[in-house]
Image: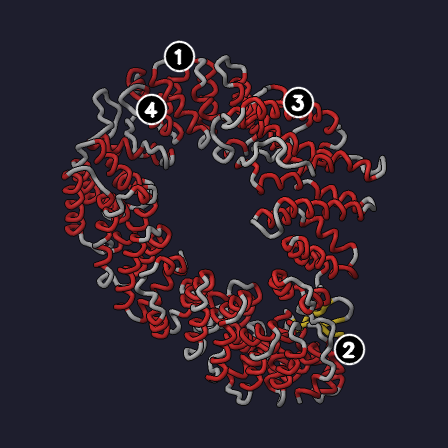
């Protein structure tokens, strides 16, 4: 089972998409465990048919059939009964029935006696096809299967498909019916039923967009559509909206072997709309078809003139990542010659048009293609050094380090099966390049590829190759190249690999602290530079494993240990090795800490800085020595280096209570220093006390931090942290009187920012900007404090809200200069982020009108400053109000439709949020959704949200029952 699913997912087959949905995955295991599906082209229609055969036609669960005699009920074919129940649910307009109604329907339409009908329902419940729901009702195990059961009935009935088409045109927004119709038409197509083409044509030509959407979803899953239906679908897609095209392609890519005479024409129609997003979706759809119909995919791509890649716009339409790899692999399967030509042109176009993402992902695909056919794509791989050497422009320099590992994977593919003499020849070529002059990207490519290849090779050849390469490190530049692209990547791999173990052993034998050590070039220079990587440091344990160890480390004298603490030995190696529990390095570091008087030379200062940098990664072993050394020596270089690290890099330290106490002590030490480190120390103390913002602080602590310094940057950080805390844990401040105690300090901060704005004048220096930013944070915090802690019961609401309203709706900008980047729309919308909490408080206290009025005023204010719908910041603003919108949705169900329309006229993002949270809160909101979809006043921009929400919160119908369904389909 696992191998089948992994194969399907890795190649974009429909089965690989099925397993993304819990229902489909559950049905797969129910039917096919443990062996897996019998074929790899299973799609949703096939899965439902197989499940029907295994649960409805008979019961073939593993628990039923075994060595013991089978239960008589297991062979009972209940297909007719399930079809009747499917139609009965369509008659109700809901995917559930009262138990008594289900039995009555079976008696009336399946010609069963009542006792037999009751037993049929009981058997279906035991098989798991039906389930009980509250109120004495029954439903299918999932709504999707209810739709399939109804589709089975409509397909089997004499006039089922014709009556379905008539019903859909009369009720285009009934998604329960639409999904049942899709199942019915797909079943008719798979089973070769004739006479349904005119019914589909009626749906496709209907004037309602929802009906055409249903028709397109039906058409996408067909394997044998008539040519007239294809022509109609092409015309429909040329004028379809984005929701229709996206839905069409979603069903198409989930269909196993869709009609090869249809999809090239329909996707071509979408492509010719010349919309970039549509074109990218077309190519992603093609990737899912590539393994099923490779010849048709190759012909389709050639017809688009895509494979020449002569236009920049075509590159922008390409899918990236896994989809681009699947596209090229599918093209290779269909036509290796075309794929080879297209790959060459694609690489050249990516370079010519400077499209870095396309080049990166094409190189990633090349390694997969080389694995499929190393001979055919060997020529492409051979040209990689030339290609990378051509990227000498400044625009490419920053991308080379990202491109090299990906290109090296492709280059290494050709060497994985190489013999030792062939690898030695490749090593010799690199040695020649390094000896000829300054190394370039091509040398880096070969070195990086060798790191992948040598990792799995035997010990002796690996050490011989390393010796040859290190011998070419005659300059610091070549030594840096070998260290960065060969030795460091090789050492960072799993130590269990024999080549990696050999490289570590080679390092141990060649690098030891001596007075004549050369760390710039030669063998020792290569090793030292590889172990002493700054941007991407090796793990401390790896460094420790690569350094020389005497047989008895405890017998080393202090003079020997001091070689680990002085030039030319790299100071960072001592620190890293001590963190990795290297016994000599641990003794050397302890000697450094306890030496009296403490060392004060430049080497000792650099060692302390390295200690501060590594302490964040290895706090258990280094944090204590770092603090002790700083206290004894008075040199705070290491503590400052630690304090300047961001919260992300200090995560490991902040998670441990003991380490947080040490950080607090470090912060206090920095604050007490006479060399201007008070700001740095205060920031570190704040991080430790709040665990990087995760733990709450008290009002007293906040006041102490705000009054401890006049530094604008620190005050800004403190204020932002308080605002974030109020979002999560405002209740902890109740009883501490935060508004009265903090407001004087906040006003003082605002006044200082106002002074800086007036006196400094543009262009503002860093300190002036920080004072203004701190003033803005103080202003925002005053709003937050009012929103959370104003006593809304003490006086009339209007009187209570007056100070807050004055703050919130002040003219822009408040404290920041006009046109400043910090006053961009995403920044100033933060003045409203605490108001949803206040509105919830007002609503809970019975002041619903005041709460709604406040929200309406926010929308009017933002629309006045910047028109609705402009910029992503409005969508984020609506996100902030989700939990109050949930309150709005629950207040008055009868007026929900009008409320949604009201929001849609003011801000479409708020309307979308209200639709979604109402569905989450109320469950089935079918009446409201369908009323809005039918209402001409509903803005077109709201329709996708309505349709999307209706797919999971509105498929229970819209209240219009198909009362005569049994008679009309008969």
Distance from Cα at disc 3 to Cα at disc 1: 44 Å
Foreground disc of the pair 3, 2: 3
Between 806 and 744, the one nearer to me in the picture: 806
Can you see residue 36?
A: no
- Secondary structure of residue under mark 4: helix
Q: In which quarter of the image is the C terminus?
A: bottom right
Lower position in the chain sequence, tag 3 or tag 2: 2
Q: In the image, residue 151 lies at what x, y percent?
A: 61, 79
| Label number found at residue 571 | 4
Residue under the image location 76 percent in, 47 percent down = 853
Lower position in the chain sequence, tag 2 or tag 1: 2
Lower position in the chain sequence, tag 3 or tag 1: 1
Residue 706 shown left or right of residue 669 in the figure? right
Distance from Cα at disc 3 to Cα at disc 2: 73 Å
Q: Give the residue number, with chain letter if any, for mark 1.
A: 598
Q: In the image, residue 463 lies at what x, y percent?
A: 20, 40
Residue under the image location 28 percent in, 18 percent down = 560
Lower position in the chain sequence, tag 2 or tag 4: 2
Quarter holding residue 961: bottom right
Q: Are marks 3 and 1 in contact (CB under 8 Å)?
A: no
Q: Residue furthest right?
A: 795
Quarter holding residue 586: top left
- Secondary structure of residue under mark 1: loop
- Secondary structure of residue under mark 2: helix
Q: Give the residue number, with chain letter if any, for mark 3.
A: 748
Residue under the image location 60 percent in, 35 percent down = 694
Distance from Cα at disc 3 to Cα at disc 4: 47 Å
Q: Give the residue number, with chain letter if any, for mark 2.
A: 100
Lower position in the chain sequence, tag 3 or tag 4: 4
Residue under the image location 65 percent in, 72 percent down = 173
Q: In the image, residue 513 lies at what x, y percent?
A: 26, 24
């Amino acid at each position: 089972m696992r191998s089948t699913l992994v194969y399907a997912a890795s190649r974009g087959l429909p089965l690989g998409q099925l397993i993304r949905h819990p229902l489909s995955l559950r049905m797969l295991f129910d039917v096919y465990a443990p062996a897996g599906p019998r074929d790899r082209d299973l799609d949703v229609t096939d899965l439902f048919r197989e499940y029907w055969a295994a649960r409805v036609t008979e019961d073939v669960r593993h628990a039923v059939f075994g060595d013991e005699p089978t239960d008589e009920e297991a062979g009972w074919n209940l297909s007719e009964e399930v079809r009747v129940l499917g139609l009965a649910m369509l008659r109700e307009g809901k995917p559930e029935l009262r138990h008594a109604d289900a039995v009555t329907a079976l008696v009336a339409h399946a010609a069963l006696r009542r006792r037999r009908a009751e037993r049929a329902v009981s058997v279906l419940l035991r098989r798991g096809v039906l389930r009980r729901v509250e109120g004495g009702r029954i439903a299918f195990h999932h709504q999707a299967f209810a739709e399939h059961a109804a589709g089975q009935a409509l397909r089997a009935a004499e006039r089922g498909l014709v009556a379905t088409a008539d019903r859909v045109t009369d009720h285009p927004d009934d998604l329960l019916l639409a999904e049942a119709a899709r199942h019915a038409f797909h079943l008719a197509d798979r089973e070769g039923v004739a006479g349904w083409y005119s019914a589909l044509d009626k749906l496709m030509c209907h004037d309602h967009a929802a009906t055409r959407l249903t028709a397109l979803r039906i058409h996408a899953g067909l394997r044998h559509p008539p040519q007239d239906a294809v022509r109609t679908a092409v015309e429909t897609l040329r004028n379809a909206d984005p929701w229709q095209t996206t839905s069409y392609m979603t069903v198409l890519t989930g269909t196993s072997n869709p009609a090869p005479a249809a999809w090239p024409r329909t996707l071509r129609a979408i492509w010719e709309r010349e919309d970039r997003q549509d074109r990218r979706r077309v190519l992603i759809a093609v990737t899912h078809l590539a393994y099923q119909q490779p010849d048709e995919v190759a012909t389709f791509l050639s017809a688009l003139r895509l494979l020449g890649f002569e236009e920049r716009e075509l590159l922008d339409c390409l899918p990236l990542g896994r989809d681009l790899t699947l596209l090229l692999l599918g093209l290779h399967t269909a036509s290796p010659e075309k794929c080879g030509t297209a790959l060459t042109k694609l690489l050249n176009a990516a370079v010519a048009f400077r499209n870095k993402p396309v080049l990166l992902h094409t190189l990633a695909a090349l390694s997969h293609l080389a694995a499929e056919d190393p001979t055919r794509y060997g020529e492409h791989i051979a040209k990689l050094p030339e290609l990378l050497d051509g990227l000498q422009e400044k625009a490419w320099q920053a991308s080379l380090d990202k491109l090299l590992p990906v290109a090296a994977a492709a280059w290494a593919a050709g060497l994985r099966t190489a013999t030792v003499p062939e690898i030695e020849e490749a090593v010799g070529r690199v040695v020649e390049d390094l000896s000829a002059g300054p190394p370039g990207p091509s040398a880096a490519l070969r070195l990086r590829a060798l790191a992948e290849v040598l990792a799995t090779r035997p010990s002796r050849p690996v050490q011989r190759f390393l010796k040859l390469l290190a011998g070419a490190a005659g300059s610091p530049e070549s030594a840096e190249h070998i260290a960065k692209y060969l030795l460091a990547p090789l050492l960072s791999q799993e130590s269990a690999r024999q080549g990696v173990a050999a490289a570590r052993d080679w390092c141990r034998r060649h690098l030891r602290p001596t007075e004549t050590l050369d760390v710039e070039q030669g063998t020792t220079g290569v090793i030292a530079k590889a172990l002493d990587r700054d941007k991407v440091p090796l793990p401390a344990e790896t460094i420790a494993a690569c350094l020389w160890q005497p047989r008895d480390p405890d017998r080393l004298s202090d003079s020997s240990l001091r070689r680990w603490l002085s030039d030319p030995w790299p100071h960072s190696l001592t620190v890293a090795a001590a963190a990795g529990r290297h016994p000599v390095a641990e003794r050397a570091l302890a000697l450094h800490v306890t030496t009296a008087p403490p060392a004060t030379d430049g080497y000792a200062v650099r060692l302390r800085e390295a200690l501060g940098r590594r302490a964040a990664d290895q706090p258990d072993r280094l944090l204590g020595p770092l603090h002790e050394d700083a206290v004894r020596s008075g040199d705070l270089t290491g503590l400052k280096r630690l304090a300047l690290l961001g919260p992300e890099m200090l995560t490991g330290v902040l998670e441990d209570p003991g380490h947080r106490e040490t950080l607090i002590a470090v912060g206090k030490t920095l604050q007490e220093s006479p060399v201007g480190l008070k700001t740095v120390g205060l920031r570190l103390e704040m991080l430790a006390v709040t665990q990087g913002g995760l733990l709450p602080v008290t009002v007293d602590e906040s006041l102490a931090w705000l009054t401890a310094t006049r530094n604008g940057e620190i005050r800004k950080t403190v204020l932002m942290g308080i605002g974030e805390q109020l979002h999560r844990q405002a209740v902890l401040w109740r009883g501490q009187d935060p508004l009265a105690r903090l407001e004087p300090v906040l006003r003082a901060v605002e006044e200082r920012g106002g002074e800086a704005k007036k006196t400094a004048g543009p262009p503002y220096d860093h300190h002036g900007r920080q004072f203004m930013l701190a003033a803005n944070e103080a202003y925002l915090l005053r709003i937050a404090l009012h929103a959370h802690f104003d006593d809304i019961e003490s006086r009339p609401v209007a009187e209570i809200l007056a100070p807050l309203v004055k703050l919130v709706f002040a003219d822009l900008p408040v404290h920041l200069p006009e046109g400043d980047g910090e006053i961009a729309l995403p920044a100033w919308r933060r003045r409203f982020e605490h108001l949803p909490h206040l509105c919830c408080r007002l609503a809970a206290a019975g002041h619903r009108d005041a709460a709604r009025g406040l929200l309406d005023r926010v929308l009017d204010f933002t629309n006045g400053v910047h028109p609705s719908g402009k910029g992503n910041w409005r969508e984020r603003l609506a996100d902030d109000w989700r939990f109050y919108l949930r309150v709005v949705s629950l207040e008055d169900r009868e007026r929900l439709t009008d409320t949604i329309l009201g929001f849609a006229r003011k801000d479409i993002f708020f309307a979308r949020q209200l639709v979604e949270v109402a569905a989450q809160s109320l469950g089935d909101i079918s009446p409201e959704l369908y009323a809005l979809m039918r209402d001409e006043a509903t803005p077109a921009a709201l329709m996708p949200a309505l349709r999307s929400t209706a797919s999971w919160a509105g498929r229970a119908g819209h209240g219009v029952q198909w009362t005569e369904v049994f008679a009309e389909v008969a």
